[in-house]
Image (cartoon, rainbow, N blue to C red):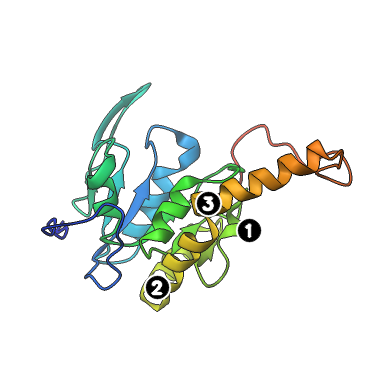
Amino acid sequence: MNVNPRKPGFDCGAADLNNTRDYFHFLGKTTWRIKNFKGAKKVVLSVPCEKLAVLGGNRIEWNRRFKITLSPRVKFYGMVGGREKLRLINGSKGLIHPIKAHESFGLALIESLYFGCPVFGTPYGSLPEIITKDFGFLSNKSYELSQAIKNAGSYCRKLCHEYARDCFNSRKMALNYLQKYEQVINGQKLNPAPPRLKEKYAGFLPWE
């Protein structure tokens, strides 16, 4: 797998939106079945010549049982972090995120969008709210996600980057928290009615 070499002077906070990109990435612990690494592999390997960079696992795993990934189109970087992690995301065509749970937020989404990567994942948890049609594609069917990644180049990297930068920055988060604190201090309710669980799942959410 040919990953772009690190460029001199690479700034871990800067996004290169005009670079050549030749792989997709998975960001999460491969040993956590709920993250659905197996599904991510299926999505990418179903498309000829596409490659997957795995940030959060190893080719050989010993988690309860022996697992090995044989495909040379999948490259593993282990529990990578810091500048190297951001460099790898910045070289990706998009994030493959077929999680099988109602994840409440998902920092992997924002990190990837910041570097111009659209998100291809499942329609669970916060994803339908964050990943609209301009920023990726959602489905719980691997075939549909495989078809979608063929058009990864049609998404605007600049739009993805600006969306993450402007809507999910630390200043905006802090100001929103302050606004909520002021509501509570002034005796106002945060919600018109107490939150309630809409549905409960005992296992993994549907994935085909």
For label 3, the SS is: helix
CA–CA distance between discs 2 and 1? Answer: 20 Å
The residue closer to the viewer here, 178 or 92, is 178
Residue 141 coordinates in the image, percent (x, y) = 53, 58
Mark closer to the chain start, 1 or 3: 1
Which mark is on residue 171?
3
| Labels 2 & 1 near each other (Cβ < 8 A) | no
For label 2, the SS is: helix
The residue closer to the viewer here, 126 or 120, is 126
Question: Mark 3 is on which residue type?
Answer: Arg
Image point (15%, 60%), residue name: 4
Which mark is on residue 158?
2
Observer able to see residue 196: no
Residue 136 coordinates in the image, percent (x, y) = 49, 66
Quadrant for the N terminus in the image? bottom left
State left or right for residue 198 relative to residue 54: right
